[in-house]
Amino acid sequence: MYKLFSLYETDGIFEHDKMNVKHSDNIFITPWSIAHFATGYVMSEAGINYLSGFTIHSLYEAITLYSETIKDKWKKVYIGHKTDSIFNTLGDTIVFMIGMFLAKKNNSVILLLIILLIGLIFYSTSFQNYINDKRMNKFKELYPQLKNVKFHDHTERYNLFFYLWIFVSVTLIIKKKIEKKI
């Protein structure tokens, strides 16, 4: 099934072998598209040009789509996750490039601070738990045989993203302050 937008992170293939569940979705925009947009914006603010940003993001998407090592790591966060869809990969890349484009066209400190705050909230463990819970509850709604399955919380893995986002945010704020003095 192809969908333009979903509030649930159910894109790609989800399997739960013991419960005989195999789910497949192709979703262009998911909650994680927020991170792709914010990252595109921030990379542009950091001085990365369109071609480099597109290349870096495309490499990231290719690695997450085809690398078995990365898929295994995602399976620990999103239990049952097998792979994303190419449709979502395309959507995330377009959203990333829109973020870069917006940063180039609207060089506003206020907008930068809003996007940094959105990233901070998005990468927080609490918000990642929320997304994961919504995802698992959606799967339990779609597949009643999963009703009593206990899914483990592995979102502590997002602490790295969260702290990296804080570092990048502070660096960009300092950069903006320096640029303003010059």
Image (cartoon, grey):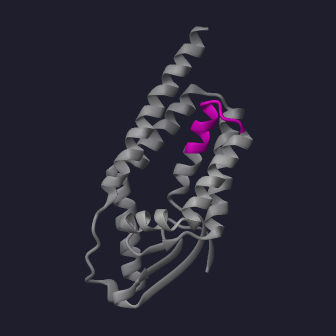
Residue for point 52% across, 50% down? 35
The prevailing secondary structure element of the residues shown in magenta is helix
Residue 142 position, x and y percent, is: 43, 83
> Could you tell whether 83 is left or right of 44 in the image?
left
Residue 27 position, x and y percent, is: 59, 69
> Could you tell whether 1 is left or right of 14 in the image?
right
Residue for point 58% across, 13% down? 180
Please tell me whether residue 132 is drawn above or below residue 55 in the rendered image.
Answer: below
Residue for point 63% across, 54% down? 59
Which residue of the protein is positioned furthest toward the right in this rendering?
51
Q: Note whether residue 8 is visible.
A: no
> Could you tell whether 72 is left or right of 37 in the image?
left
Q: Note whether residue 100 is visible.
A: yes
User: Magenta stretch: residue 161 in it?
Assistant: no
Residue for point 54% across, 21% down? 175
Query: Which residues, given as a range, are shown in magenta?
Result: 39-49
Please tell me whether residue 127 is drawn above or below residue 144 in the rendered image.
Answer: above
Q: In front: 152, or 141?
A: 152
Residue 88 position, x and y percent, is: 61, 65
Q: In front: 70, or 116?
A: 70
Please tell me whether residue 167 is drawn above or below residue 24 in the rendered image.
Answer: above
User: Magenta stretch: residue 40 in it?
Assistant: yes
Q: Please identify the quarter of the rendering in which residue 101 is found.
A: top right
Residue 98 position, x and y percent, is: 68, 47
> Could you tell whether 13 is left or right of 87 in the image?
left
